[in-house]
Image: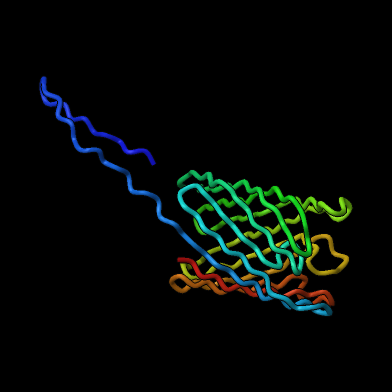
Amino acid sequence: MLARATLALAGDEIATEPPATAAEPAWAFSITAYPTQVRGGDNYTSGIAIAERGSLHLEARYNYESVGARSAFVGWNFSGGEALAWKLTPLLGGAWGETQAVIPGFEAAVAWRAFDFYVEAEYVRDKTAHSDSYTYAWSELGLRPVDWLRVGLAGQRTRVYGGERDFQRGPFAQVTVKHLTLGVYCFNPGASDQVVVGSLNLAF
């Protein structure tokens, strides 16, 4: 942030006020765990940690692009709107471990009244085998009837677990109590390849 000096004019006199330094943006952090139950497959837990300061966005992930993969990203937040609020975060990062890749991507959100839409997407460009490169996406269409409850539909395209579906979808629900948000997502409900994802988020 740049400090702005205030000049006050009084008749022919110019009174210089002490420089007024804008408050430095504070760091904001969030940690989310996603325990995942795969019907007919291996269960696992993935995690995401985010740190933001002003427009700067830093993100680290575990078991996200693939089981055993670790990844890190840097991005920049753009936002605006009042009645229709929006936020866009372009990202660039990389993965190591089970998956070794350069990963460009983005996260975006739009909110209007009690409705919101969120999407994140990334292209995982595998450095060891180009044929293993793929595009991952996660989207949510949500409704918040009261401040502490959010429900809606979610969809994802992933290679973390097997299955013939190119795109998976299902309902979700989230409950927020102060800094803690608990959620559950059910993809392909009732099917032989049903996937249930829990979410535990702490923001501070």
Outermost residue, top direction?
Answer: 12
Residue depicted at 55% across the width and 60% down the height: 50
Q: Nearer the viewer, residue 183 or 145?
A: 183
Q: Quadrant of the C terminus?
A: bottom left
Q: Nearer the viewer, residue 161 or 127?
A: 127
Q: Position of residue 182 (x, y in %)?
A: 56, 74
201 lies left or right of 95:
left
Q: Position of residue 59 (x, y in %)?
A: 59, 57
What colouring does the structure picture have?
rainbow
Q: Nearer the viewer, residue 15 or 9?
A: 15
Q: Is residue 18 above or below residue 31?
A: above
102 lies left or right of 130:
left
Residue depicted at 55% across the width and 67% down the height: 31
Q: Position of residue 55 (x, y in %)?
A: 49, 47
The quarter of the picture where residue 17 lies is top left
Q: Nearer the viewer, residue 58 or 155?
A: 58
The quarter of the picture where residue 42 lies is bottom right
User: What is the count of numbered marks?
Assistant: 0
113 lies left or right of 162:
left
Q: Quadrant of the N terminus?
A: top left
Q: Position of residue 96 (x, y in %)?
A: 73, 59
Q: Is residue 49 above or below residue 127?
A: below
Residue depicted at 64% across the width and 57% down the height: 72
